[in-house]
């Protein structure tokens, strides 16, 4: 089984499209877990309508939210998907098939492509500049990881508020996790006015400095 985990906060505008992009995949044995973090909109109701397992928490912390989803996951493989992104056709099977070809792999990373959300007004669209080329993603929609890997490297940092993915990637390297990168597009990353990275830039910088200092100490 593959467990697809979506950490969501007031994601009602886009989460339906994100869930649909997973449910349309050509892989049958998938469980979908949506962890609603301090949601005040109808994110949970939408996820319920799609038949997802839903969990409500009140952290306002994406790392903690991801960890809750991981704890509930029953699958051998873990795939995180952002609540405002879209998985491409056959993306999950493309990731999973790498494990079939080489069972010694512990994680597979793929590529993402940015797009500006089409419903935005022209002024907002001009403010958001999407990268023209595909790029290797850091986590959501672009990585399938064996669940047992988290026993080796630990879960997401629950102190850092915006740099948890970078810190997790460092631990993957430190533990010599066997990773393969495939030049295949699996996720389309939506740019809009409330992207987490855009609205938490200062916190990201603080977290990255803290990660760097900690790494230098070691």
Image (cartoon, rainbow, N blue to C red):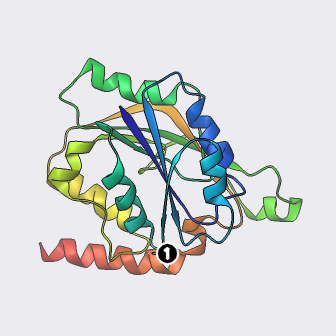
Q: Residue at x 44, y 77 (%)?
A: 205
Vertical position of residue 139 compared to residue 156: above or below? above
Residue 60: percent from left, percent from top: 49, 75
Estimate how packed mark 1 is, as few (under 14), some (14 to 19) or many (20 or more) residues with alpha carbons within 10 Å. Answer: some
The reply to whether residue 132 is visible in this rendering is no
How far across and how far down the image is residue 106, in percent? 23, 37
For the residue pair 80 and 136, the one nearer the viewer reads as 80
Query: Residue 62 location in percent, x, y?
Result: 45, 67
Left or right of residue 186: residue 97: left
Q: Secondary structure at mark 1?
A: loop
Residue located 53% across and 33% down the image: 185
Residue 98 vs 116, above or below: the answer is above
Q: In which quadrant of the rendered image does the C terminus lie?
A: bottom left
Please tell me which residue is depicted at 44% across the width and 71% down the height of the picture: 162
Q: Is residue 187 visible?
A: yes
Name the residue beneath numbered marker 1: 60
Vertical relation: 174 (above or below) 65: above
């Amino acid at each position: 089984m593959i467990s697809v985990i979506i950490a969501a906060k007031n994601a009602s505008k886009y989460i339906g499209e994100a869930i649909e992009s997973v449910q349309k995949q050509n892989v049958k044995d998938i469980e979908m877990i949506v962890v609603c973090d301090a949601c005040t909109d109808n994110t949970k109701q939408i996820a319920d309508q799609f038949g997802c397992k839903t969990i409500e928490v009140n952290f306002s912390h994406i790392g903690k939210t991801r960890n809750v989803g991981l704890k509930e996951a029953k699958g051998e493989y873990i795939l995180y998907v952002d609540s405002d992104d879209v998985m491409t056709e056959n993306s999950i099977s493309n990731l999973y098939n790498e494990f079939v070809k080489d069972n010694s792999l512990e994680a597979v990373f793929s590529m993402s492509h940015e797009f500006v959300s089409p419903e935005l007004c022209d002024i907002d669209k001009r403010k958001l500049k999407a990268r023209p080329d595909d790029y290797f993603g850091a986590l959501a929609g672009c990585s399938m990881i064996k669940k047992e890997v988290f026993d080796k490297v630990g879960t997401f940092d629950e102190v850092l508020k915006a740099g948890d993915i970078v810190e997790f990637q460092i631990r993957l390297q430190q533990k010599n996790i066997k990773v393969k990168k495939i030049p295949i597009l699996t996720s389309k990353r939506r740019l809009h006015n409330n992207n987490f990275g855009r609205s938490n830039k200062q916190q990201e910088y603080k977290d990255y400095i803290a990660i760097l200092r900690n790494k230098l100490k070691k």
